[in-house]
Image (cartoon, helix red, strand yellow):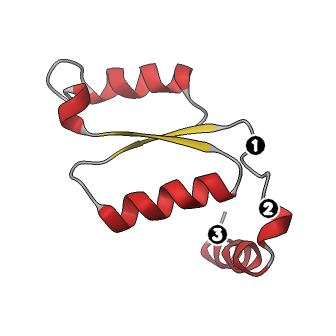
Amino acid sequence: MNFSKTLSLAFNIKSYPELFASALKGKTLAMIFEKPSLRTRATLDVGIYQLGGFSGCFLPMEINLGKRESVHDVAKNLEHMVHGS
């Protein structure tokens, strides 16, 4: 999707949220943050919820990202557990 289409979609979602209320129905998305972030996490959590989805947040220290499991292994495991990350 190009930048113009992305902006157009964002405008439509913001203008007509009721049309997109089930866009992520039944979908689970994983978020991995390198460090804690109030605004980014809150925005993504709320946005995913408003679109009908569920979000899970994982911090590197919780999953030992790059230590116990490589980034590649974490990505491959999440690929089988969630719809997007």
Q: Which corner quadrant of the image does residue 38 belong to?
A: bottom left
Q: Which residue is mark 2?
A: 20
The reply to whether dot 3 and dot 1 touch (C-beta < 8 Å) is no
Q: Which residue is mark 3?
A: 2
Q: Which residue is mark 1?
A: 25
Q: Nearer the viewer, mark 3 or mark 2?
A: 2
Q: How many callouts does the rendering have?
A: 3
Q: Which of pointers 1 and 2 lies earlier in the amino acid sequence?
A: 2
Helix, strand or loop at mark 1: loop
Residue closer to the observer: 2 or 13: 13
Q: Tell me how far mark 3 sits from mark 1, CA to CA.
A: 25 Å
Helix, strand or loop at mark 3: loop
User: Considering only vertical position in the picture, is 10 above or below 33?
Assistant: below
Q: Residue at x 44, y 22 (%)?
A: 76
Label 2 neighbourhood size at 10 Å, few (<14), some (14-19), many (20+)?
Answer: some
> Type of residue at label 1?
Lys
> Type of residue at label 2?
Phe
Q: Residue at x 19, y 27 (%)?
A: 64
Task: Classify the position of the N terminus by image quarter.
Answer: bottom right
Q: Tell me how far mark 3 sits from mark 2, CA to CA.
A: 20 Å
Q: Which mark is residue 34?
A: none
Q: Residue at x 73, y 72 (%)?
A: 13
Residue closer to the observer: 1 or 31: 31
Q: Residue at x 81, y 76 (%)?
A: 16
Q: Position of residue 24 (x, y in %)?
A: 71, 47
Q: Which corner quadrant of the image does residue 42 belong to?
A: bottom left
Q: Which of pointers 3 and 1 lies earlier in the amino acid sequence?
A: 3
